[in-house]
Image (spheres, rainbow, N blue to C red):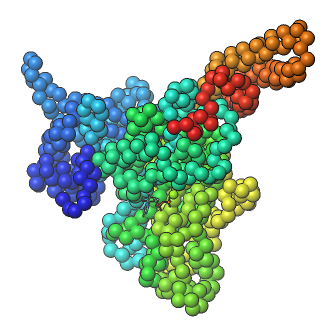
């Protein structure tokens, strides 16, 4: 133990320290090597590993174990088995074998498979991923040992998010090693890193329970904008309220025990919106950790009589929530996206940078596809969110470097002297060191030593975007290697020519302007950049033969796996739209309409009485209000019927249109009806009272 070590950090993880303490020395050494180098586990040590893991888990209060995996629902899944094994009448022991650890069989018939598995062959298999350590999940009465696993069908097709992610890490690692070889770098460990910033909303549980739309769809389908929401920008980075701080502290304590490096916490732009950012980690682990972060946020909120909303757009008219995925590549421990000090390192930096730029330009549709989903449709393109057009922001300094490469002209060096930029020979002109300009409107921004992909939604598994990013970058690096191999002559000159060509060909994807301006979609169309506006359009790239070939080539997803993902994505989309439309109709008819009808009747009756009594004042006001309420009541009736018809016909576009139209009337009514009788908590309550 060193000075100041945070003792509870990682206490609930079967860490290297726990492994050394609970396994025989030789077994521990082998297991740790497997974990560090992502090598397959030696099956002869499985029983010994299982025994040690069980003892550690029991010491920590565990009674059960589970294979923890990430099915294509977007969440996580677990089925618990007790260590318990009866060995005679009223006698039992606690057992956990190597077989229990390495693989499991689960009835998978209710997990989405997109046609990959027929129900008669409903078996699914889980396989231990030793690169992500086992951990313990605590609850009030004990704990469960969780073993991170991959999940596939009987035929070996993947049914989860982790398997393609692991395959893509392998693909981009190989490509990186190949590219580094061109620069004469010896083979070294490639590490893809991810830091995932998680945005979320908190609402008081009392309000939540009175909002059937939040309960069922995670989003408010009705709610008029309050007079004050985020106009004053007084929430962003504001002082954190004590109740929220208590919640955040509990979240962090649990995360730290799980070895999750939660680092930053702050208020976000919208009222009642917050962010949690961990330190970046190795990609596969960071993805698992983000899934755990979402779970801990939800559970801890509940304990504090709050509800954590991870939906991308819980409240119309204020910012939605995203998950900023910060991605980079390290080679032999050195970040390849950090500009170096010597010419060779800068040549590497520029080549990797251009590999990414080329990848995003060629495969913008693939990246956009990974952010598709009913929830994110409300967010992409809206206020403060990245637009559905994928473009790259580089900042002024890097743009100037691209200019110099493109034109092969003289630039101004760091020393201030005019010089001709020659890749691999000169040091580069002033490069961003840390202080990149911030452009919050860009979906894909270079931020000094990493790329930040901001389009993913707050509820989405990072594995989706990261799998695609790895694959397209692998393809780009390979293409660059192929080109370099085909060129004769001096390496530096060839590289110079190649980079110049790449800048010319792919610069259109680089955009420094305001991504939220109404001119950008027009300009983007002129540049030939795709703008896939909603989920059905964004999922289409899964069926593009060129993309199928790309993912097959890298062994990340087969043709059938791609087809199944399209199927699952569309099905999920249609169901969510339907659930939202259904809950809208129910609320409008059974909660809003009775109140409006009642108020209208009361007023109409009062109007009749007033007239009969010959009253001179108040009649005008009563009549005007009656007319307004009556018109809305008629509208409500008609629009509910329209939505009902749309639901019966089943087309999602028609349902969305009818739901939006109904919302206009309900939101108008919210401002007309007696506040004391309005049946739903309002935005000004939910967003400000907590
Ligand atoms: P912001 O984008 O809000 O300015 P930071 O610059 O602090 O935030 O970083 C955001 C996230 O990026 C953090 O999770 C951080 O750990 C992560 N990050 C930093 N360096 C890397 C890297 N090399 N690879 C991946 N993520 C990184
Ligand atoms: Mg950020």
Residue shown at 64%/17% (left/top)? 590
The outermost residue toward the bottom is: 417
**Residue 32 point in image, percent of width and height:** 21, 55
Which quarter of the rendering shows the N terminus? bottom left
**Residue 203 point in image, percent of width and height:** 52, 36
Residue shown at 58%/75% (left/top)? 397
Ligand 1 image position (quadrant): bottom left
Q: Is residue 475 visible?
A: no
Image position of 315 with respect to 208: above or below: below
Image position of 632 with respect to 24: above or below: above
Residue shown at 50%/86% (left/top)? 426
**Residue 34 point in image, percent of width and height:** 23, 55
104, 617: nearer the viewer: 617
Residue shown at 75%/57% (left/top)? 519
Q: Is residue 260 left or right of residue 328?
A: left
116, 605: nearer the viewer: 605
């Amino acid at each position: 133990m060193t000075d100041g070590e945070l003792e509870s950090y990682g206490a609930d993880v079967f860490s290297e320290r726990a492994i050394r303490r609970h396994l025989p020395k030789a077994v521990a050494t082998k297991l740790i090597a497997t974990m560090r180098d992502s090598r397959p586990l030696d099956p002869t040590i499985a029983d010994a590993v299982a025994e040690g893991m069980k003892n550690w888990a029991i010491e920590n209060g565990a009674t059960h174990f589970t294979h923890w995996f990430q099915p294509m629902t977007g969440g996580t899944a677990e089925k618990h088995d007790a260590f318990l094994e009866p060995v005679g009448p009223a006698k039992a022991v606690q057992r956990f074998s190597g077989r229990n650890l390495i693989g499991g069989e689960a009835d998978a018939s209710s997990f989405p498979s997109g046609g990959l598995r027929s129900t008669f062959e409903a078996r699914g298999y889980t396989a231990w991923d030793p690169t992500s350590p086992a951990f313990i999940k605590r609850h009030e009465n004990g704990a469960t040992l969780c073993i991170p696993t991959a999940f596939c069908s009987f035929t070996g097709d993947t049914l989860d998010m982790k398997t393609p992610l692991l395959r893509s890490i392998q693909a981009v690692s190989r490509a990186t090693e190949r590219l580094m070889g061109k620069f004469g770098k010896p083979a070294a460990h490639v590490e893809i890193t991810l830091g995932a910033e998680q945005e979320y909303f908190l609402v008081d549980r009392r309000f939540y329970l009175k909002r059937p739309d939040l309960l069922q769809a995670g989003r408010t389908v009705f709610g008029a904008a309050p007079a004050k929401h985020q106009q004053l920008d007084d929430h962003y980075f504001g002082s954190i309220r004590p109740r929220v701080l208590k919640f955040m502290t509990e979240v962090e304590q649990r995360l730290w025990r799980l070895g999750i490096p939660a680092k930053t916490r702050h208020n976000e732009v919208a009222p009642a919106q917050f962010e949690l950012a961990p330190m970046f980690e190795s990609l596969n682990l960071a993805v698992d950790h983000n899934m755990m972060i979402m779970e801990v946020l939800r559970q801890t909120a509940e304990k504090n009589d709050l509800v954590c909303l991870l939906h991308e757009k819980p409240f119309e008219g204020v910012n939605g929530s995203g998950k900023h995925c910060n991605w980079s590549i390290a080679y032999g421990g050195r970040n390849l996206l950090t500009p170096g000090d010597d010419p060779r390192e800068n040549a590497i930096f520029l080549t990797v940078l251009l590999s990414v730029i080329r990848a995003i330009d060629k495969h913008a549709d693939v990246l956009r596809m990974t952010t598709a989903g009913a929830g994110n449709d409300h967010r992409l393109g809206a206020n403060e969110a990245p637009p559905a057009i994928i473009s790259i922001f580089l900042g002024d300094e890097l743009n100037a470097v691209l200019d110099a490469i493109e034109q092969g002209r003289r630039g101004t060096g760091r020393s201030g002297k005019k010089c001709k930029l020659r890749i691999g020979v000169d040091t580069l002109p002033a490069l961003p060191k840390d202080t990149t300009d911030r452009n919050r409107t860009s979906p894909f921004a270079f931020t000094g030593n990493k790329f930040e992909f901001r389009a993913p939604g707050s509820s989405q598994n990072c594995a989706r975007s990261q799998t695609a990013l790895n694959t397209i970058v692998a393809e780009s690096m390979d293409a660059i290697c192929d080109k370099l191999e085909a060129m004769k002559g001096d390496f530096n000159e060839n590289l110079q020519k190649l980079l110049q060509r790449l800048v010319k060909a792919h610069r259109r994807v680089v955009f420094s302007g305001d991504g939220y301006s109404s001119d950008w979609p027009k300009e983007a169309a002129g540049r030939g950049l795709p703008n896939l506006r909603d989920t059905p359009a964004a999922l289409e790239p899964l069926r593009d033969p060129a993309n199928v070939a790309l993912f097959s080539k890298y062994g990340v997803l087969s043709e059938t796996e791609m087809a199944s993902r399209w199927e699952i994505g569309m099905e999920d989309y249609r169901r969510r739209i339907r659930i939202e439309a259904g809950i809208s109709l129910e609320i409008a008819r059974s909660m809003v309409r009775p109140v409006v009808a009642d108020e209208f009747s009361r007023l109409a009756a009062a109007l009749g009485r007033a007239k009969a009594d010959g009253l001179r004042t108040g009649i005008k006001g009563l009549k005007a209000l009656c007319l307004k309420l009556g018109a809305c009541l008629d509208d409500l009736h008609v629009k509910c019927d329209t939505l009902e018809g749309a639901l019966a016909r089943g087309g999602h576009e028609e349902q969305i249109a009818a739901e939006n139209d109904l919302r206009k009337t309900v939101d108008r009514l919210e401002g007309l009806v007696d506040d004391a009788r309005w049946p739903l908590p309002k935005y000004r309550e939910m967003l400000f009272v907590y």
